[in-house]
Every structure is written in structure tokens, then in C-alpha cells.
Image (tube, helix red, strand yellow):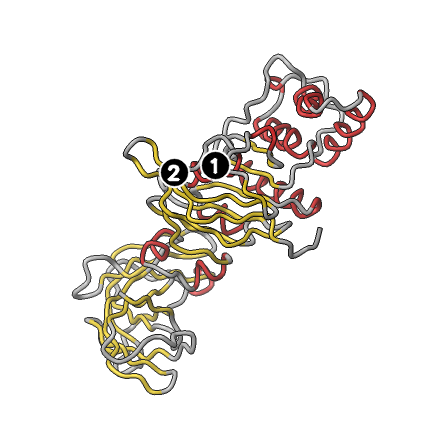
Amino acid sequence: MMANETILELTNLVKKFGNVVAVNNLSIPYIKRGEFVTFLGPSGCGKTTLLRMIGGFYYPSAGDIIMHGERINDIPPEKRKTSMVFQNYALFPHMNVFDNIAYGLRVKKLSRKEIEKKVLNVLSVVQLEGLGDRKPTQLSGGQQQRVALARCIVIEPQIILLDEPLSNLDANLRVMMREEIRKIQQSLDLTTIFVTHDQEEAMSMADRIVVMNQGKIEQIGTPIEIYEKPASLFVAGFIGHINLVKGKIKSRQNETLTIATDLGEFINMNEDLKGFKAGDTATIVIRPEASSLEKAPSKGKGNSFQGRIRSFTYIGYIARYYVEVSGRELPFIIDISNPGGRGILKKGEQVTITLPLKFHCIKT
């Protein structure tokens, strides 16, 4: 198989449960071999339904699932070249680790010698050597998760499907296991589709993120694209903290926009915003770490406005300030790194916020 080979295409997929449309005319043009793709969105957005359609546990109401050029809509799960890790791992409690992992191989009627070779090899891959005789109840949550992953990997599927497999783990173990999963995925060049509602999880693991909302795709892109260039207000608000400022394009000269807002006029020299013209309404999108914050307000400084610190949160590596700005219902959020070295500003202090000369805008 070629490295850039398209393994999966989803075209105009619809899934209805009675009158409820869970997935609404959704298309993903390609998922490449070896890619790690994450379906990200709030509860009820359709991401797990979409994953289960790919795995064959739900059949589409309309549209096509194409794998290696073949329409697989009606093929049952056991005959698809996919394998799924469920949220609760779905391990057989009466079987030991070895037999849990070997189950799919026995269904395929492989020889005893071949099964033993494959299981021992995958136990090594997931770092569970020597634990083959243990029952699932004798394992930690992280070890159970690795057994579920090993059972998935051992049958050598072309696509691994992971349905929020880290949601039952504590915070520290989640971080460790997402690193482990990514390492295993990359070392074996596994095509992987991962479902989560956790933005940090998606950002840290995925090659591409599919952001979903109400059964539809809001945006497909790399973590950097999703974070820095959100395509909609939903994506901007769902991924991390955000400041939104509504405005109107006052003028455009070459790549320079002048945007009029209730906070004043701002210059934007972002050459990526080619579709904007004078008169367009736009929402400025500013991440908390992208602006600067100064004590003792200065007058006449470009791209700046004034406010008063309402509150702050000290997180160690950053101080997060919530700045009250006249005319805004919501505070402006500013993250300042290395707060210990810079000094902590106090509640009630007057400050100046300065926006960068290049920032993202969304047509609204």
C-alpha cells in the first residue's frame, strides 16, 4: 500500500433514528493510510454514531462509506477490515489477558502456534509482557485499556476505531495513555479514527481534526488550523478560550484591513483574509495568549484599548486575567506566561490591552 493512499471516503452520510437526524449529509473526502483522525464535538453531535457506521454497527440511512474504492454500507462488522475499542473496553471478564487478545484470531481459525506468536508480539507492543495469565479485574484501568487496544491491533485491521477510550481514566493516566496510543499508532503506521469531546486530547493526538456539531461537520483541519484559523464561531468557541469582537470592515488597502468595532478601530495585516472587503461584517477572533497586557494605560497606542482587571487565576506557568472593558458584557481574557518573573497584576488595576497586527477574522 502507498503511504498517501486513501483508505476511507464518506459521502453524503445520513443516519436517522426515527425522526431524529443524528448525522446529517456529512462527507469526508479522504482518510489516508497511517493517518490519525479525531472526531471532536460536544455530546450528541453525532461523532459516535458516525464511528459506529464506519465500523458497521449502524447502517447509514443514506450516503456511502467507501473503503479502498469499495462500498461497504451493508457489510457486517465482523467482515469489515476495521476493529473497534469501545469506551468501556468490552473485555471478557472470565477470560485472561491472553485469551481476550486471542479471541479474534480464534474466530479467524488461525493455528495455535500462529495465535501464540501474534499475541506475544502484541503484548510486547503494548508493554504488557508477562501479564497474559491475569484476568481483567486484576489490571489497572490503563492496563485494561492496553488489552483492549492489543485485541484490536492483533487482528491487523486496516482501520482502528477508538470510541472515547480514555474517558474512564483519571487525569494523569489519560495524559500518559494518549501519548502511548499515539506512539503505538505511529510505530505500526495504523490508520486510526478517534472519538472524543476533549479538545486537548484531540489537539495533542490528531493529524487532522473533524469538528462536529448537530450532525454536521463545522471544519476539517490540522490542530494548528483548527486552533488558529477556526472556520466558524462554533469552532472558535469550542476549541480553547477565545475573545470575540464584532465589527465591520471599514476599508481595505492591499492586504491591510481596517476594522471598526465598539472598542475602536483595529488594523489587521493578515494576508490570509483574502475574501474580506469594505462593508463586510466580521468577528475578530483573539486567543488569550495573542494579546499583550500593560499596567498604567497608555494613550494613542495602535490596536489598543483600556480596561480594568476584574479577576485573575494563577495557573503556575500562566496568569489568566479577566479584564472588564467598557461596553462588553463578557470580560476580555488575557494569558500572560511566566507570571512569576513579570509580576502579578492586581484586581482593580487599570490596564491597556494591545491586539497583534495579524489576527483571524470570521465573516458573520
**Residue located at (46% from left, 41% from top):** 196
Judge the density around disc 1: few (<14), some (14-19), many (≥20) Cα neighbours within 10 Å: many
Question: Which residue is the site of mark 1?
Answer: 53
| Label number found at residue 173 | none
Disc 2 residue type? Lys
Question: On screen, 88 above or below 183?
Answer: above
Q: Earlier in the sequence, mark 2 or mark 1?
A: 2
Direction from residue 236 to residue 227 in the image, left or right? right
Seen as rendered, the residue at the extreme top is 94
Question: Which residue is the site of mark 2?
Answer: 15
User: Do callouts 2 and 1 mark residues in contact (Cβ within 8 Å)?
Assistant: yes
Location of residue 124 (image quadrant):
top right
Location of residue 105 (image quadrant):
top right
Location of residue 265 (image quadrant):
bottom left
Q: Give whichever of 216, 209 is nearer the camera.
A: 216
Q: Give whichever of 158, 40 is nearer the camera.
A: 158
Seen as rendered, the residue at the extreme bottom is 253
Q: Position of residue 97 (x, y in %)?
A: 68, 21
Q: Give whichever of 181, 70 is nearer the camera.
A: 70
Query: Element type at marker 1?
Result: helix
**Residue located at (61% from left, 47% from top):** 68
Q: Position of residue 85 (x, y in %)?
A: 56, 32
Q: Give whichever of 68, 276 is nearer the camera.
A: 68
Disc 1 residue type? Met
Cα distance between the residues tagged 2 and 1: 9 Å
Q: Position of residue 151 (x, y in %)?
A: 65, 29
Question: On screen, 63 above or below 133?
Answer: below
Direction from residue 11 to residue 121 in the image, left or right? right
